Amino acid sequence: MNPNCLTCEVLSGKRRAPGGTIFQDALWEVGSVLAPVLVPGYLIVNLRRHCEDLKDLTPDEAAALGSVLRTTCAAIHRVLAPPRIHVASYGEAIRHIHFHVIPRHAGMPPGSLGTELYIRWRRLLYRMGRKAIAVGNAAEIVAQIQDAFDRIR
Ligand SMILES: [Zn+2]
C-alpha cells in the first residue's frame, strides 16, 4: 500500500464506492467509480497491489486481467446493454494500475473523445449544482452488475 495513493485508499477500505466491491480475488478488484457517479455502471478494475506500470505486472496478474475485464464488460452488458463499453487505463493523475470501464449509453456521443467530453460536461453540471446519479441508485445498479458478474463467472 502506498499512503499517497487514492486507489490504495479504496482497496484498504478508507474510501468506499457506491455499492462496494463487485468482485475481488488475490490479484484484482472491481467496483464502482467513486461518487459522484456521472455515468450509470461506470466501474473501475483495480490491481490489488500498488504497481504503477503495466510492464511490471506479474505473469499471473497479466493472465488474469483479460478474464476480469471480459466478465466486467459482460456483466455491464447484461444489466445495462449499452451500445458500447469503453475500457481505458491512463495512469496520469492516479499512477496505481486501474482500468476505467465506462458504458457508453445511447444518449452519450460515440467515440472515446465523445465519452470524455460527456463526462467532463456532467462533472461541470454537477459542480454547478445539478445532481449526479443518486448514491442509492448507483449502489443499486452496482448490485445488479455484481449479481450478473457472479452468474457469468
Ligand atoms: Zn496504490
Image (cartoon, rainbow, N blue to C red):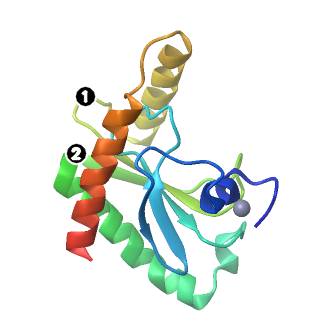
Residue located at (59% from left, 69% from top): 47
Mark 1 sits near ligand 1, with its Cβ under 8 Å away: no
In the depicted structure, whether residue 61 falls above or below residue 22: below
Which residue type does callout 1 highlight?
A: Gly
**Which residue is nearer to you in this view: 128 or 139?**
139
- Comes first in the chain, label 1 or label 2: 2
> x, y percentage for residue 86?
38, 51
Residue 141 sits in which quadrant? top left
Report the residue marked by disc 2: 82
> In x, y percent, where is residue 129?
50, 10
- In the displayed structure image, the side of residue 18 where residue 137 appears, left or right: left
Say which residue label 1 marks.
Answer: 107
Left or right of 11 in this view: 101: left
Q: Is residue 39 visible?
A: no
As rendered, which of 65 and 153 lies closer to the eye?
153
- Work out which quarter of the rendered image holds the N terminus and state it: bottom right
**SS class, disc 2:** loop
Estimate the x, y position of residue 52 in percent, counting from the top left: 72, 66
Q: Residues within 10 Å of mark 2 (few under 14, many from 20)?
A: some
Q: Residue furthest right?
A: 3
Q: Is residue 1 left or right of residue 33?
A: right
